[in-house]
Image (cartoon, rainbow, N blue to C red):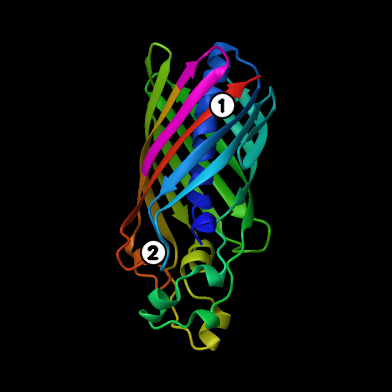
Amino acid sequence: MQRKLIVPAGALMLSTCLGAFAQVKNETGAPAWGIGLGAVARTSIYAGESSSFMPVPLLSYEGENFFWRGIGGGFHVLNQGGFKLDATVGARLNGVKKDDFGVAQLAAKGINRNLLADRHDGLDVGIAGSFKGQTGAVELALKGDVAGASRGLETSAKFSYPLHWRSTLVAPNIAVHHYSNELANYYYGTRDEEVARGVVNYKPGSTSILRIGVDVMRPFADQWVFIGNLSYSALPGEITNSPLVDKDTKGVTSVFIGVSRRF
């Protein structure tokens, strides 16, 4: 269970850090490919889940028009000055199998694990606009599941302020992610077929998650770069009150560190 449930947080941080890596690449003229290895540690969310640690591969590509960052990529529809408009595609790895939940923890909330159904991963397609100026960088994004899992939408707004200290880049950031009814209900609520089998009916509805964090980048040994991220996501009551979520969960702290070689 630990290996599966850590993926969403790790994937998000991977994309964030590789995005920062792309900024360093664009400013320094470094090669377009990046290959490396990282590790993610994250506190628990779901009932029966423990804090987890997992290694993750790092793969990035930054071309003139196309880019790839970890589990997603896209195409620059418009790239002028500090403004970019991108068409994006990426995996949503929030899926969880019913057997990955803790039997005792669910039973304490009145749920028989055998009555649950799996939540599947999704494939998001969307559009993102970003602007980078002297006062920081702003990104607005809209994406939706086209794989038929949740069929939900996510909108997000992020602000970051890159700070340079010699060759080191430190970028504090804050973001708000808004989940549609379909997205939040699918991953944090109980499904209609489960309710028909006797599971409590819980639908969180649309909700928003506030995330604060800091990205760190430091090149070393010519073509190598250290990548790090620390973030905290404050979960709203709509999610923490879910019978699928651990009763003591209020937020999620995630740490990512990795190294990548540029080609």
Name the amino acid, label 1.
Ser
Q: Is residue 60 magenta?
A: no
Reading the chain from its start, which is encountered first: label 2 or label 1? Answer: 2
Q: Is residue 245 left or right of residue 150?
A: left
Q: Is residue 223 magenta?
A: yes
Which is more toward the observer, 129 or 65?
Answer: 65
Q: Is residue 241 above or below residue 15?
A: below
Which is more toward the observer, 118 or 77?
Answer: 118
Which is more toward the observer, 137 or 27?
Answer: 27
- Residue at image point 60% right, 42% down: 127
* Badge 1 element: strand
Mark 2, other Cα within 10 Å: few <14 / some 14–19 / many ≥20: many
Q: Which residue is mark 2?
A: 239
Where's residue 116, x and y in %?
54, 78
| Mark sitting on residue 237 | none
- Residue at image point 54% right, 88% down: 197
Q: Is residue 213 left or right of residue 148?
A: left
* Residue stretch in magenta: 218-231
Q: Which residue is mark 1?
A: 260
